Image (cartoon, grey):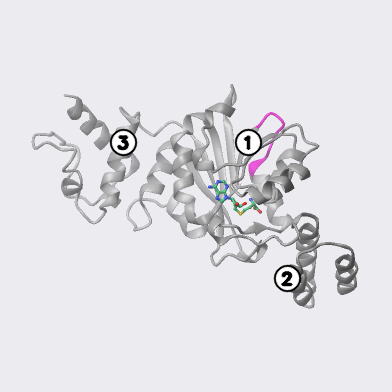
Amino acid sequence: MPLLAEFENVAASSTINIALLTELKTTSSRENYENVFYLQAYRIAIVNWPNDFQPRKSLGQNFLLDENVLRKIVRAIDPKPEDHFVEIGPGMGALTKHLLEAGSHCLAVEIDQRLIPLLQERFAAYPNFKLLNQDFREVALNGFAGEHKLRLVGNIPYHITSHLVFTAFAQRALLRDMLLTVQREVAERIVATPGGKEYGILSIMSQTFAHAELLFTISPHVFRPKPEVESAVVRWQFQAPPLPIVDDDFYVAMVKAIFGQRRKTLRRSLSNFLNTETPLAFIDLQRRPETLAIAELIQLANGLAKTKDA
Ligand code: SAH
């Protein structure tokens, strides 16, 4: 397959981003399997990459250009016609396309106003497509939930991952599950078990209110521009906590208080929550926060919440 000839042909007749084309041309002289990847990337790029579009680092823009990886993500999502998705940061619609083609409903929430006309035009033929030009952190999902639970998906901007995840968790009653591409280190924190330094607020929230799994990692090479870090796909399936929680808000506040000062013992970090007589026979207050399993944290919060009301 004379790749370079094909590049020249298409280049002559299209409005492809010139920097990207140059990059593709240089790289395409490498081994064959790489050519196949770049040709795919190239095809997607010429169809979808708007002329003169400059990705913004401040918006965490790294676009996924590899159909194989996209298909792997879509297999993990397993979209069905009866599903209602909310997609955070659709970008140019790489994942959106697959959800819509599966017949699912999709509300795409994209903050970058420059991408809105492109998305509108690309998916104009899909009655199951809705688009919001908004910051996901300011979207109230109850306006979209109806009777069905929502499924949250996205290859999201890495610099605000925690914030996005907590926004989603605050609305977890409306959610069935969540499948996000995040930075690999963050994914490892989400699924971390007690004892290590990766175990923290993200792990605890994720594992208290959901079953969280790291499904697979993704190389930086499949994104444009290439991020500096590896990525991983994480799935959260929301479920009831392992023990009933007396007061959810109190539990979250307590976890934030003790993991905000994780080098202190429980007695010190909980000083705001404890009065001296608080009977907490079941837990040793000399322990460090990261040694506590989820069930122990729930017991602790339940114990404290009761004394708070007394
Ligand atoms: N999902 C696309 C784009 C990933 S880049 C793909 O895989 O190719 C991250 C996307 O999130 C960008 O489109 C960016 O504009 C958007 N974004 C960044 N901050 C956002 C926010 N707060 N709310 C919604 N979208 C946001």
* Amino acid marked by disc 2: Ala
Residue at disc 3, CB closer than 8 Å to ligand 1? no
Residue labelled with disc 1:
85
Q: Residue furthest top?
A: 147
Residue on which the image places disc 3: 251
Please name the predominant secondary structure of the magenta segment in the image: loop
Q: Nearer the viewer, residue 104 or 113?
A: 113
Say whether disc 1 or disc 2 marks the residue closer to the N-terminus.
2
Sequence-first disc among 3 and 1: 1
- The correct choice, above or below, for 115 with respect to 56 in the image is above
Residue name at image x 61 percent, y 50 percent: 112
Residue 95: tell me if it is visible. Answer: yes
Q: 10 Å neighbourhood of mark 2: few (<14), some, or many (≥20)? A: few
Q: Report x, y in % for residue 247.
A: 31, 29
Q: Quadrant of the C terminus?
A: top left
Residue 19 numbered tag: 2
Q: Is residue 8 above or below residue 295?
A: below
